Image: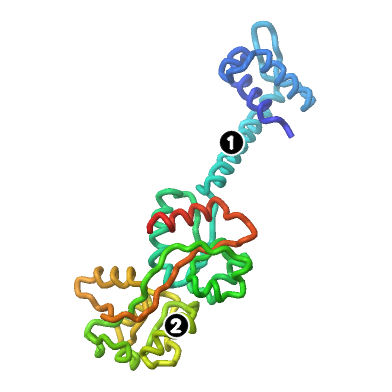
Amino acid sequence: MTDPRLLKHFVSVYRSRSFRVAADQLGISQSTVTKSIQRLETQLGVRLFNRTTRTVEATDTARQLIARAEQALTAMGSFDEDARLLAGGELGGIRVGAIALAAESLVVTSLARLSRTHPNLDVEVVVGSSDVYRDLATGECDVAIGDEANFHASVHSSSLKMLPLYNEELVLVHRAGHPATGSAALAEFADYPLAIPSRYFNENRLLAAMNRQADAPESPRYRLNSLSACLTLAATSDVVTLSTRSVAEQSVAGNSQPRIEIANLNIGIDIHLVLVTVARSAPTPAVQAFHEACTALR
């Protein structure tokens, strides 16, 4: 493989038609340029310049090679720049697996920041998988946003690394004018269908206390892969849903005539959001950048 420095010296001499001018442009001695051209000619087995005491003329071979030499140098420069950007997490792409309860709060706000700090980074977010930790362990995603309760219950946790992010209160949401509006008793809402965001929700751990409190042992009737869809369903029916407080408050504040309300009761459920990576390998710079975006907003 030809040394890039030799190509650079060749291009400089070709464009300037002078070993002295090329040396000045490159900031090196004229003898160094002369030796580089001689070495390149020896490696290629061709003559590149016809030299006299006064002139330097490119040969036909040099004229045929100059475009390729410049293309090679450009490609090398692009390679170095891409390597630098990749090393800084500023280029490339990652696939994020996220539970629905995190997608419309933590993930969205993190991506907004990432778009400013790393605008060339491609991110694909997959929401609503039945098991984001399995997806991470099997290589279907590069990083996962989930909840701590499910992480500890996962059969894949031993091969993964968990990084706590923040805690979020879950609230019960219903439409304005719902028959149970104003009730402070969870049991009053148990008579109505419950929708939860995503199949990936550890009902045994996170819903057991609520079900005991409401005397409602049955599982949720509706499971949707979108928190927005749950809120829309609650706004247009007597279905009640669970939401993170931040998203619920934004939904209430975003309507001039609110169609949904947050129930005035404590259901006793908090979700501990975590970022999870593969334990056996260090996070890539892109994953580190995403992690920083997640933590910077809290």
* Residue displayed at 37% across by 79% down: 268
Q: Residue 197 in the image: x percent, y percent?
A: 42, 77
Q: Residue 12 in the image: x percent, y percent?
A: 61, 22
Q: Which quadrant is home to the N terminus? A: top right
Q: Amino acid at mark 2?
A: Arg
Give the camera-side residue of 152 and 254. Answer: 152
Q: Which quadrant is home to the C terminus? A: bottom left
- Residue farthest left in this picture: 257
Q: Is residue 88 above or below residue 273?
A: above
- Residue farthest top in this picture: 53
Q: Residues within 10 Å of mark 1 (few under 14, many from 20)?
A: few
Q: Is residue 285 above or below residue 231?
A: above
Determine whether label 2 and label 1 are within 8 Å by CB. no
Q: Which residue is mark 2?
A: 223
- Secondary structure of the residue carrying tag 1 is helix
Q: In whole angstroms, how far apart are the C-alphas of marks 2 and 1?
A: 51 Å
Judged left or right of residue 3, residue 192 is left
Q: Is residue 173 above or below residue 13?
A: below
* Residue displayed at 57% across by 64% down: 141
Tell me the number on the disc at residue 94.
Answer: none
Question: Within the image, what quadrant is residue 138 found in?
Answer: bottom right
- Secondary structure of the residue carrying tag 2 is strand
Q: Nearer the N terminus, badge 2 or badge 1?
A: 1
* Residue displayed at 28% across by 70% down: 249
Question: Within the image, what quadrant is residue 225 found in?
Answer: bottom left
Tell me the number on the disc at residue 77.
Answer: 1
Q: Residues within 10 Å of mark 2 (few under 14, many from 20)?
A: many
